[in-house]
């Protein structure tokens, strides 16, 4: 069962403010800092969310900066397979907090054993997101996970069901649901301002399916970099530093590798943009039923006849991750620049002040839900349906044929090969 956060905090607060009664003698502490009690406008220590990090690098470090800016967060520990990254994150957090007590772990399971940690930020590569999240939920931690949150249809299902089982507050890192220009565009579609929606467009990367191994290099010392733990549930292959972005490598070459990546790179952007299309249509909890590919473009049809177009090009230049919603009375297109173009100027509104890559409001939504125990805007059920839609469309491209999908059973109709690809095998000991 999930630990009682309230009782723990009450104990800390009482310990700080009151004395300890021992053998009938009232003993007062000699000094209690005002910050501990929240008397100087700060958040009392007993009310802070204690955060740990798992696999923090480029994007994860960016996310972490927004957590560290929140007055009710204290970052306590980092777990990473690379020593250089552990040291870097420790320094980032301690500088922001004015502390020197951030713990470092090579194995994330040791971090999860700490009873003081309330929540974790997971920003590993794709292959680890669902597994680490499920381990964290079992340990009683709430979770902010970078996307794609699961590398297969089966793991999308297991992730959602595990979060329900443990009562976990889970926020998927598809932060554009919390960015105001995207929210406004979705509100126009959902509120009928564009008329009856007939087509939605989601931007994606150019698709890539790579299976060739990089040349083998000598294994580093395990404490410097733990290759076996970095691979985790993914199939084994020889070590090469470029996969992990260590040594002379500045970017992780695992992207596009089928064993490590999600859906032939489709979910790099599709996890965001298909998710927004689902939200604009009110289709959370379901998916399209027909999928097919034409060159670099993928298409899908919902049961009500609305068409989903997933394409890497042909956009209006409004920044990365654009989406477009088209209805009988007009259209809207917007992207990460925060700018928006509409078919009718009368639809223009006041909607934003941050870029689409900025997780500020998304992080705040998660932290508020950790306290209230409400569901965040990108909870595991939302992630389940939008990610599955991406996985199904990627499989239609990979197999080179139209696929018919039943969103109720989350299975393909009359296609045994596609159904086998819903699941990816995990190496021992990471079988869920």
Image (tube, rainbow, N blue to C red):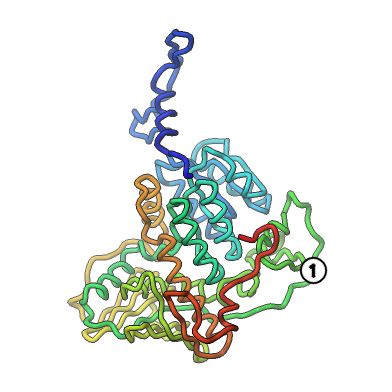
* x, y percent for residue 261: 60, 71
Q: Is residue 244 left or right of residue 4?
A: right
Q: Does residue 90 appear in the picture of this structure?
A: no
Q: Is residue 242 left or right of residue 358?
A: right
* x, y percent for residue 227: 72, 59
Residue 400: quarter of image: bottom right
Residue 178: quarter of image: bottom left
Q: Residue furthest right?
A: 218
Note whether 208 is above or below 55 in the view shown: below
Quarter the C terminus occupies: bottom right
Identify the residue at horizontal 47%, vertical 82% (top origin).
Answer: 312
Q: Is residue 189 left or right of residue 120?
A: left
Residue in front for this viewpoint, 240 or 431:
431
Residue in front for this viewpoint, 2 or 291:
2
Q: Does residue 262 appear in the picture of this structure?
A: yes
Identify the residue at horizontal 54%, vertical 51% (top origin).
Answer: 136
Q: Is residue 75 left or right of residue 242?
A: left
Number of marks drawn = 1
Residue 417: quarter of image: bottom right
Residue, disc 1: 216
* x, y percent for residue 20: 45, 16
Identify the residue at horizontal 46%, vertical 61% (top origin).
Answer: 173
Dot 1 alpha-carbon crowd within 10 angstroms: few under 14, some 14 to 19, many 20 or more: few
Residue in front for this viewpoint, 75 or 371:
371
* x, y percent for residue 373: 37, 48
Judged from the image, the secondary structure of the residue bearing numbered disc 1 is loop
Note whether 431 is above or below 420 in the view shown: above
Note whether 25 is above or below 86 in the view shown: above
């Amino acid at each position: 069962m999930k630990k009682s956060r309230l009782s723990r905090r009450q104990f800390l607060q009482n310990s700080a403010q009151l004395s300890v009664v021992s053998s009938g003698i009232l003993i007062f502490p000699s000094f209690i800092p005002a910050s501990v009690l929240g008397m100087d406008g700060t958040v009392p220590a007993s009310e802070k969310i204690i955060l740990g990090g798992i696999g923090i690098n480029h994007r994860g470090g960016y996310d972490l900066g927004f957590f560290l800016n929140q007055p009710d967060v204290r970052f306590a520990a980092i777990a990473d397979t690379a020593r250089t990254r552990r040291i870097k994150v420790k320094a980032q957090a301690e500088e922001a907090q004015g502390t020197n007590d951030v713990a470092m772990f090579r194995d994330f399971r040791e971090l999860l054993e700490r009873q003081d940690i309330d929540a974790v930020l997971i920003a590993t590569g794709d292959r680890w997101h669902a597994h680490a999240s499920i381990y964290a939920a079992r340990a009683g931690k709430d979770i902010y996970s970078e996307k794609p949150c699961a590398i297969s249809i089966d793991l999308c299902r297991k992730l959602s069901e595990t979060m329900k089982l443990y009562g976990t507050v889970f926020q998927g890192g598809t932060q554009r649901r919390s960015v105001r220009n995207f929210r406004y565009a979705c509100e126009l579609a959902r509120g009928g301002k564009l008329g009856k929606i007939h087509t939605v467009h989601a931007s994606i990367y150019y698709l890539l399916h790579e299976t060739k191994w990089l040349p083998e290099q000598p294994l580093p010392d395990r404490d410097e970099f733990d290759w076996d733990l970095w691979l985790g549930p993914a199939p084994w292959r020889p070590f090469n530093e470029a996969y992990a972005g260590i040594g002379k490598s500045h970017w992780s070459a695992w992207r596009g590798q089928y064993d490590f990546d999600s859906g032939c790179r489709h979910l790099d952007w599709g996890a965001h943009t298909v998710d927004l299309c689902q939200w604009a249509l009110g289709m959370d909890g379901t998916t399209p039923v027909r999928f097919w590919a034409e060159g670099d473009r993928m298409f899908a049809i919902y049961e009500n006849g609305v068409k989903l177009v997933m394409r890497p090009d042909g956009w209006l230049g409004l920044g990365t991750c654009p989406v477009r919603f088209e209805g009988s009375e007009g259209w809207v297109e917007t992207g990460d620049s925060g700018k928006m173009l509409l078919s009718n100027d009368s639809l223009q509104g006041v909607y934003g002040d941050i870029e689409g890559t900025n997780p500020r409001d998304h992080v705040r939504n998660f932290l508020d839900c950790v306290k209230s125990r409400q569901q965040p805007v990108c909870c595991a059920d939302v992630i389940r349906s939008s990610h599955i839609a991406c996985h199904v469309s990627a499989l239609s491209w990979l197999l080179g044929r139209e696929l018919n999908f039943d969103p109720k059973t989350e299975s393909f109709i009359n296609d045994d090969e596609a159904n086998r690809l819903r699941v990816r095998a995990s190496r021992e000991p990471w079988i869920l």
